[in-house]
Amino acid sequence: MSPRIATFVFATAVLGLFALDRERKVRTSKALWLPVVWLWIVGSRPASSWLGLGAMTSSVSEGSPFDAGVFAALLGAGIIVLISRRSRTSAYLKTNWPILIYFAYCLLSVLWSDFSDIAFKRWTKAIGDLAMVLIVVTDPNPTAALRRLLSRVGFILLPASVLLIKYFGDLGRAFDPWGSLAITGVTQDKNLLGVITMVLSLGTAWRVLTLLRDKSAPNRGRHLLAQGTLLAFGVALLVMAHSATSGACFALGTGLMLATGLPVIGRRPAAVHVLVLMIALAGGFTMLAGGDADVVHAMGRKTDFTGRTAIWKAVIPMAPNPVVGAGFESFWLGPRLQRLWHIFPVIRPNEAHDGYIEVYLNLGCVGVGLIALILMTGYWRAVAAFRRDPALGGLMLAYVAAAAIYSVTEAGFRLLDPIWIFLLLAVVAAGGIASGAGKRTPQPRRAASDRASRLPPSDTHALIPSGRTIETF
């Protein structure tokens, strides 16, 4: 099949997937397209790269002014949307104080960065990740918004990756520093392809499992066909990309969703604790028994994690301050970067390939502690969410677990990283589910002042002028 015909078939298939997965009676805000476009860019390549404007990049540190403008426009539009939803936005921000403290500390760390101007620009861009998450959870129909976010991003990126890999090798394949062929798809490296495929496939697996369990779901057959096809694309890409970490996290997350869907575990938070503890103990006993090398080899890794351990040994002593770090996203700049490129001339690393070490380098032990707080908060909220929605709570738990495990061998807690965005989404959404999910029965019309006085301060439901409540997680 020629590339031109393949492109036509691809476009037709994508339109078919959108048609199969349509929900005519479900309404979501048009603002949902903002996080969709954000993830299209974050999960593939910069907009300048797709438009052939790579030459506009001013420097490695500052990036492309065009791409900065695109992100600024999306962030600006997102802030306008969130201001228009100020009641619900404020409620979610107040209940997610660990995330707010982390971002506030990141901003504070700009003060001791050697490159404060670059650090501040990156912090501003990092705020966009949180803004896009808030747009999803404050949507009038947040569960439907999550479904559509996953589908709109997945229907484009995953089939497009297969198209580029199969028919446009100069775009979908590349050579790594050792001269081996790497599968990149719509991204610029195989690790990014692996992580965007993993997070989207976890969401798709949740959709498929939900549809299989709910035989009364409207138009169940065509939704299953669309989501099953997307899941097949995701699994195929994980196999083709040979991304061991992403593949293992997908297997772990899907296993958690399957296990938590069992009657003996569903709606029983204590059983979830036991399940997670068993997984942690199994991993710990494997390490103590010396079986970690066998596990690493089974995942397709070398015992040095493909050179990662050498990077870890080199960068940890170079941390400027073990307590507060080098400043937000400031370690891999200037003389330190040049020194590390001299030590590793072939790899030329620009990250630690470990999320916890990466945070330590930039934000010190204080930053690592705040990340641990976010992970623990996400875990407890996901477990609590089982009382109201076991299926959705299972997805949130899968994302938290995947982020924690993925960041052992990849820098997963960085701005504009898909796993970081979905971790934020899981923490915020799980809190919404646990605090009072679902639709409320419409209330009789009351005076505005009476309605406001009866609304509990911690309630994440926002009243609209007609007196009906907006659905929340």
Image (cartoon, helix red, strand yellow):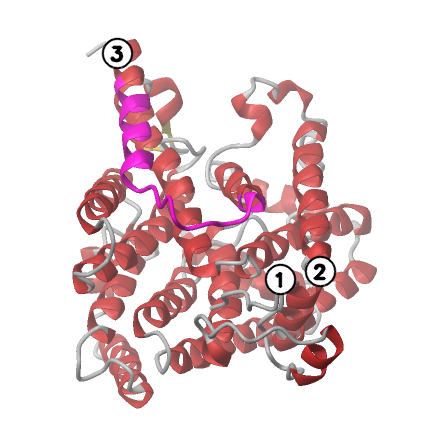
Alpha-carbon span between mark 3 and mark 1: 49 Å
Residue 361, disc = 1
Q: Where, quadrant-wise, is the N terminus in this rendering?
A: top left
> Is 312 situated left or right of 92 in this image?
left
127 vs 339, nearest the viewer: 127
State if disc 2 and disc 3 touch (CB < 8 Å).
no
Q: Nearer the viewer, mark 3 or mark 1?
A: 3
> Percent position (x, y) of residue 284?
29, 79
The residue drawn where x is 72% and y is 60% is: 327
The residue drawn where x is 69% and y is 35% is: 68
Is residue 164 visible from the viewing direction of this image?
yes
State if disc 2 and disc 1 touch (CB < 8 Å).
yes
State if disc 1 and disc 3 touch (CB < 8 Å).
no
Secondary element at tag 3? helix
Mark found first going from the N terminus, 1 or 2: 2
> Is 119 situated left or right of 178 in this image?
right
Picture layout, residue 69 above or below residue 319: above
Q: Which residues are magenta?
A: 9-32
Question: Is 20 a magenta residue?
Answer: yes
The residue drawn where x is 67% and y is 75% is: 94
Q: What residue would you read off at disc 2?
A: 326
> Is 173 situated left or right of 131 in this image?
left
Alpha-carbon span between mark 1 and mark 2: 6 Å
Q: What residue would you read off at disc 3?
A: 5
> Percent position (x, y) of residue 398?
34, 66
> Percent position (x, y) of residue 366?
65, 75
Amino acid identity at mark 2: Ala
Magenta residues: mostly which secondary structure? helix
Mark found first going from the N terminus, 3 or 1: 3
Secondary element at tag 1? helix
